[in-house]
Image (cartoon, coloured by chain):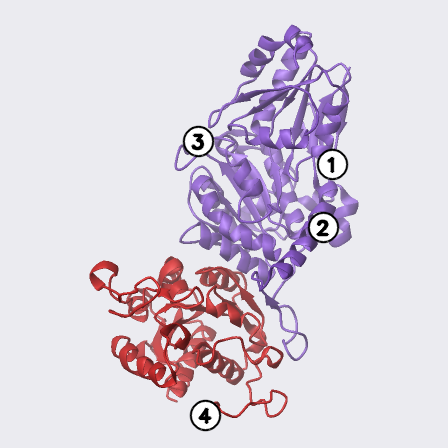
Chain colours: A purple, B red
Amino acid sequence: MKEVVRKGCTVFSDHGPAFGWDGGLLRKGGRVIKETQLTGEYGAVLEKEQRSFMTGNEVVAWAALAAEADFMYGYPITPQNEIMHYWSRLAPHFGRGFLQTEDEMAAGFAMLGGALVGKKTFCATAGPGNILMQEPIAMAEMMQIPGVWIIQQRGGPSTATVIYSQQELRLTTAGGNGEGLRIVYSTASHQELFEYTIKAFNRAWQYRFPTFVLGDGYQAKLREAVTLFRPAAKGWTLIPAEPLVRGPGIPALDREPVHLRNTFNIEEELYARLEEQLAAYERLTPEVVEWEVEVGPETEVLLVAHGIVARAAKQAQKMLNQQGQKVGYFRPITVRPFPGTALRQAVGANPNLRLLVVESAYGQLLSMVKAELYGLTNPIDTLLKPGVGVTAEEIVATVTKRAPKEVCHGG
Amino acid sequence: MADEKSTVVREPTKNPNMPLSWRKETKPHRFCPGCGHAMALKALGEVVDELGILDRVLYGCDIGCSLLSWDFFNFDSVQTHHGRTIPVVVGAKRARPETIGIAYMGDGGGYAIGAQHLVNAAQRGDQITAILANNTLYAMTGGQLAPTTLPGQKTGTTPYGREVRKTGSPLQGPELVAAIAPAGAYVARGTVGEYQQLKGYLKKALRNQMEGRGFSFVEVLSTCPTNWRTNAKDTWAFLQGEMARYFKVGELRVPEPAAPGEEE
């Protein structure tokens, strides 16, 4: 009954996602990097594909290593701390660097300094740390300095909980004092944490917009199976970092000196710059957007969720379909840029389709969905649980309460 | 000093007499007449020339008037956010240690909004050179109270003069840095009123970094006639009088053994 559409590089099998790089695009700007020379006891780990059972934070550290990240600048905040722990443990064995800074602003700005001189830099943060991090991210956005940020969402607002939420969706996609020109991947499993972290480095250095892996405390702390590998072993091309300052040659003699700024004298000067950037962002959008969708002409209810909640939604979909209900599923993988065209296509063909937006936040995903569906009249139901997890059973109960008759007569 | 014949209009194409590190395409500079930044930056440019490190420098400038130096030099430069120049330069230095990292800022950037970065970079012994222009107020935003505003000094937000009881005493930045920086630090306070001395301090601060000794910090007593609302004579008097009395010029930390060339 359902048409299954898959997009981009993620192909889901029964055993979870297997990764295939969408090669043409990535090879265009880059070159094949020779495999990292790994040594000592750590060398064996990525020598060949390895099945592991570990926490999400540990997965991210391995992914950054596999992505040939050069330097992490970090500041402690739960629930991302173990990314720093594992990275600082691994880094010296691979000639990579780590600096614990005085706060998240320093970490973010130090990242920009490292990226400016041509190194692949990253950081991980959460909650109030994510708020402070918006300042350097705004500068990265304005000056198109690449960088990768891992966000392990915790409860909000304020200190709230150290545990879990999806309440940093808005901040991560649209924080700062500008237009939110960022690329944000919302992951749902450890395999995705590994693969999208690697991918985030490529996207960041390809497009030079701040790039994020949006995880959460559950993904950070839970242990599950993951397959680690070297990108080269899969034929993935890593895009090299190039210095934006301190490139070859003597400034003023061999070449013009590089002068970078984020301040402009007049409105029109800024506007001209933003027009260029917005056009670049519009161009990258179709190349970058990723989503999962299962929908057909008979679908009556479309579950919409992102991140780890999408796992519950997928499970709920299966349970409901087994009960004979006609339930579909839509998951944005890039929450910025948002796969709006795909969502509209999934919904627009069927005026009787009812949506159920599910998230661990109070309408942050919902507002994105509504903006994308402007003009359509499909009813939207919600299951909004800010700061707490959502189970498949809750989603099933929510759908069952309304379906099937309400769906038919609703709207 | 080069500008003693200040009544003569200088033609930039003719006899520029500028350091190689100075970018003549962006001269005349954008600072107000009488601003101390130009003098401090001239000294810096000359020192970079003398040390022959033009190709290794990454120059970072802050928000505030110092941002007007973003294209001042012929070396690679990046303008950052208010107070955040130190972490940007630290990040670059850590990632590529052969870089000569220069973080240039004002007293607001270094002692208020970015004080944590100054304190921690100093405390970690980050091998960068931080140069801070102290003109006792926030100049670009219209002359407000700074951590360095002198007791009784009138600013936009202390219209009746700074009251120590309410807003504290002027921060002694080099004294703070000298107290917390580990061995190998170079810390000095110079003034645009003593150009050759200032140049010497800047040179030692850069040499200290080149030799990998530790954190280097030079505060430069600077002038702001625009916000001080002073004429040339009163500007000079305030710099050499009130400011110099409160902020003692000199070297606070010199690494042992002395860096080569220190005798000059």
> What residue lies at 64% left-to-right and 78% top-to-bottom?
A252
Image coordinates of residue A253 in percent, x first then y, are 66, 80
Q: Which residue is mark 3?
A: A163
Q: Quick check: B198 above or below B167? A: below
Above-or-below relation of B251 to A45: below
Q: CA distance from mark 1 to mark 2?
A: 22 Å
- The count of marks equals 4
Question: Which image quarter holds the N terminus of chain A?
Answer: top right
Q: Are marks 3 and 1 on the same chain?
A: yes
- Within 10 angstroms of label 1, few (less than 14), some, or many (20 or more) residues? some
Density class for disc 3 (Cα within 10 Å; few <14, some 14-19, many ≥20) is: some
**Quadrant in which residue A59 is drawn:** top right
Label 2 marks a residue whose chain is: A
Q: Is residue B37 left or right of residue B187?
A: right
- Do the dots labelled 2 and 4 sit on one chain? no
Could you tell me how far apart the alpha carbons at marks 4 and 1 are, in whole angstroms? 67 Å
- Classify mark 4: helix, strand or loop: loop
Q: Chain of mark 4?
A: B
Kindly identify which residue carries mark 4. Answer: B4
Q: Marks 3/1: CA distance?
A: 31 Å
| Amino acid at pointer 3 | Ile
Look at 63% across and 79% down and name the residue there: B25
From the image, tell me which residue sits under label 1. Answer: A8
SS category of the residue bearing label 1: loop
Give the residue number, with chain letter if any, for mark 2: A279
Which of the pair B244/A161 is nearer the observer?
A: B244
Of residue A224 and residue A195, the one placed in the foreground of this image is: A195
Classify mark 3: helix, strand or loop. loop
